[in-house]
Image: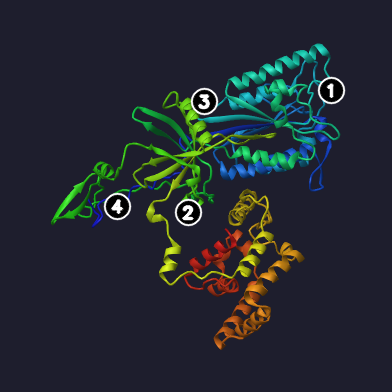
């Protein structure tokens, strides 16, 4: 039995509910089907001014995708297959098809082989324009069949299967005679439809050759079944090319999955089945795994309760108790769960409010996106659409109660309209479930200041100068998607260097640093100086400089500390700390040597040697 003191409801063994855990999480099986014909060896001018072949650009793009995928989706399986090749290597023994990598989980060797393939591509695989094939050979048809065979080996549920086709040839049968061309066209389209019937999606990445636009109407429109109004969504212009292509691939990698399914109760007897999606979630470095120190194999940890009296393992279910009136009151897990449960209803409608009543500060945490699900309740989509349209038309949101055992909330269901542009869907239709604060969650700073004698208000001239400064420094077209987390990117760069055994670690651009060059523009300098002169006075800079010089002198202790830091910095520069960390050599250094680094970086010097090493690794982002 467990004594919980004054809190019988505290459950140490109860795991915190993960709001981002995906229900029925799926894996992706992906086959990259790459055209290796003569047209793919043409030169391509990138945005950065680099010159490379289309094939090299495709392989670089795929390599970047694999590096991203092995970190974020390590359970995915990937295969790589080339068509229109000189050599053949496939399960069908078909000409012009070369399976470079069978469908398998990603590894460091997989990525290294892919990134280095272009160096010896001609000697190992080679390119062919079809002149050496038989009259009836159809590499595209055979490649689709081989890719379908690779993807069809697994019958696992909740599995996404995709073929990503890369080519810059919009007419794959242009060299065939009319009768053969018609037959090849028919059989290839049928093969693509057969794959789609088996749940395999085919995604085309077209590339325009120099001086001409990729024409989907010749063949690929029928192969992947596109309507006329969808053609523009697939066209990648000459100015986009592979910079856009890489971005599209990364977007496709992070697919939205149902977090969990809930029931939205409208009234007694009327409910809607909903799927919830986490549109924004915290990015982490991933979970670590314990390894055996001798075999380096994963270790499975187990926990058991041992009786303090007999030392035997307790097999019976544990009970909790609390003291009440000098007695022990026992509670089982089921009873505790029942006591903590507030309601059986997941989401219940309370009423409707004008959208103008919803303020920015009412949003406590990232909202959850809601979309109807027919799996639990038939007709949910029809009722959801009716409610969605009505809320948009009347400019209202639905106020509801979202109940669970850990943190019941009032929520606002805010409708979102669908937005589509020439590249496809920008935002889907649905509702955002915004978690609202309770009365105790909102502070009233105005009332607090009034109780202390009033609020001091700046002079109008000061306010005007501040507004001019803010207006001048306003970031136009800013989006958080342009700012990467530098700590995470540095962590992944170190992992990549270790996993691929690279000699150097890729530099990471810290986009969170201020734009110092931009801040030096005369127009910005003028408005900043005007603000400082108005608020702090014209002689403020000289006064600050004098005060800083006085502080720089400091006390005798500060001067000694400064001198010691300078010595530590000089000594620290003699070591290649990052290389020592990568090679695991830090533990061979003395404590004094380790403190050179910490003192130079103005980090704490306390702790044992292991703590100092861990502090250095954290500072290096490793």
Judge by depth and name the residue closer to the eye, 278 or 50. Answer: 278
Circles 4 and 1, Cβ within 8 Å, touching? The answer is no
Is 291 displayed left or right of 269 in the figure?
A: right
Is 213 displayed left or right of 319 in the figure?
A: right
Name which of mark 4 and mark 1 comes first in the sequence: 4
Is 508 displayed left or right of 588 in the figure?
A: right
For mark 1, give the secondary structure: loop
In the orientation shown, which residue stands out farthest toward the bottom?
556
Which of the 4 image quadrants contains residue 138?
A: top right
Callout 2 environment at 10 Å: few (<14), some (14 to 19), or many (20+)? few
Q: Which residue is mark 1?
A: 131
Front position among marks 2 and 3: 3
Judge by depth and name the residue closer to the eye, 121 or 394. Answer: 394
Name which of mark 1 and mark 3 comes first in the sequence: 1
Name which of mark 4 and mark 3 comes first in the sequence: 4
Spot occupied by residue 59 in the image (x, y as percentages of width and height): 72, 39
Front position among marks 4 and 3: 4
- Residue at left 23%, top 44%? 332
Spot occupied by residue 611 in the image (x, y as percentages of width and height): 49, 66
Name which of mark 1 and mark 2 comes first in the sequence: 1
Separation of residues labelled 2 and 4 (CA atoms): 36 Å
Which of the 4 image quadrants contains residue 101?
A: top right
Say above or below: 588 vs 111.
Answer: below
Front position among marks 1 and 3: 3
Name the disc covering residue 10, or none.
4
Name the disc covering residue 150, or none.
none
Name the disc covering residue 155, or none.
3
For mark 3, give the secondary structure: loop
Q: Quadrant of the C terminus?
A: bottom right
Separation of residues labelled 4 and 1 (CA atoms): 75 Å
């Amino acid at each position: 039995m467990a004594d919980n003191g004054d809190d019988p409801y505290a459950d140490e063994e109860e795991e915190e509910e993960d709001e981002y855990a995906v229900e029925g999480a799926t894996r992706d099986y992906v086959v990259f089907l790459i055209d290796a014909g003569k047209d793919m060896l043409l030169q391509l001018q990138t945005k950065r001014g680099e010159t490379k072949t289309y094939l090299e650009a495709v392989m670089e793009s795929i390599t970047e995708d694999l590096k991203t995928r092995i970190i974020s989706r390590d359970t995915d399986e990937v295969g790589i297959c080339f068509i229109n090749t000189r050599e053949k290597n496939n399960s069908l023994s078909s000409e012009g098809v070369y399976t470079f990598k069978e469908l398998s989980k990603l590894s460091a060797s997989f990525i290294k082989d892919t990134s280095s393939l272009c160096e010896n591509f001609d000697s190992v695989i080679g390119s062919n324009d079809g002149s050496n094939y038989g009259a009836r050979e159809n590499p595209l048809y055979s490649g689709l069949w081989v890719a379908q065979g690779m993807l069809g080996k697994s019958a696992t549920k909740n599995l996404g299967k995709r073929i990503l086709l890369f080519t810059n040839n919009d007419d794959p049968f242009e060299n065939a005679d009319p009768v053969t061309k018609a037959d090849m066209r028919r059989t290839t389209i049928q093969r693509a439809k057969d794959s789609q019937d088996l749940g395999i999606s085919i995604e085309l990445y077209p590339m325009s050759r120099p001086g001409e636009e990729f024409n989907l109407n010749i063949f690929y429109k029928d192969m992947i079944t596109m309507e006329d109004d969808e053609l523009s969504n697939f066209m990648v212009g000459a100015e986009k090319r592979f910079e856009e292509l890489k971005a599209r691939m990364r977007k496709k990698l992070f697919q939205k999955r149902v977090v969990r399914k809930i029931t939205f109760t409208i009234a007694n007897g009327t409910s809607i089945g909903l799927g919830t999606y986490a549109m924004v979630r915290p990015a982490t470095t991933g979970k670590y795994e314990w390894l055996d120190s001798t075999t380096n194999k994963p270790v499975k940890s187990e926990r058991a309760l041992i009786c303090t009296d007999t030392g035997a393992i307790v097999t019976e279910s544990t009970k909790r108790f609390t003291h009440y009136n000098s007695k022990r009151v026992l509670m089982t897990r089921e009873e505790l769960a029942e006591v903590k449960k507030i309601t059986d209803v997941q989401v219940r409608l309370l009423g409707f409010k004008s959208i103008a009543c919803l303020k920015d500060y009412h949003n406590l945490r990232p909202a959850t996106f809601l979309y109807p699900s027919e799996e639990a309740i038939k007709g949910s989509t029809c009722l959801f659409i009716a409610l969605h349209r009505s809320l948009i038309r009347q400019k209202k949101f639905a106020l509801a109660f979202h109940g669970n055992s850990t943190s019941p909330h009032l929520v606002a269901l805010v409708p979102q309209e669908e937005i589509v542009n020439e590249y496809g869907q920008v935002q889907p239709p649905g509702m955002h479930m915004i978690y609202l604060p309770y009365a105790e969650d909102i502070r009233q700073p105005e009332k607090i200041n009034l109780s202390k004698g009033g609020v001091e208000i700046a002079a109008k001239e000061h306010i005007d100068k501040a507004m001019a400064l803010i207006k001048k420094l306003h970031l136009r077209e800013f989006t958080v998607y342009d700012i990467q987390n530098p700590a995470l990117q540095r962590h992944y760069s170190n992992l990549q260097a270790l996993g691929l055994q690279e000699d150097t670690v890729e530099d990471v651009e810290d986009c969170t640093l201020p734009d110092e060059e931009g801040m030096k523009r005369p127009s910005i300098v003028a408005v900043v100086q005007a603000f400082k002169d108005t608020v702090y006075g014209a002689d403020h800079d000289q006064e600050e400089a004098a005060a800083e010089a006085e502080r720089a002198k400091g006390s005798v202790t500060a001067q000694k500390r400064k001198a010691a830091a300078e010595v530590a910095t000089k000594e620290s520069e003699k070591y290649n700390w990052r290389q020592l960390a990568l090679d695991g050599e830090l533990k061979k250094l003395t404590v004094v040597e380790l403190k050179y680094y910490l003192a130079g970086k103005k980090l704490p010097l306390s702790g044992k040697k292991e703590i100092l090493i861990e502090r250095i690794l954290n500072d290096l982002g490793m």
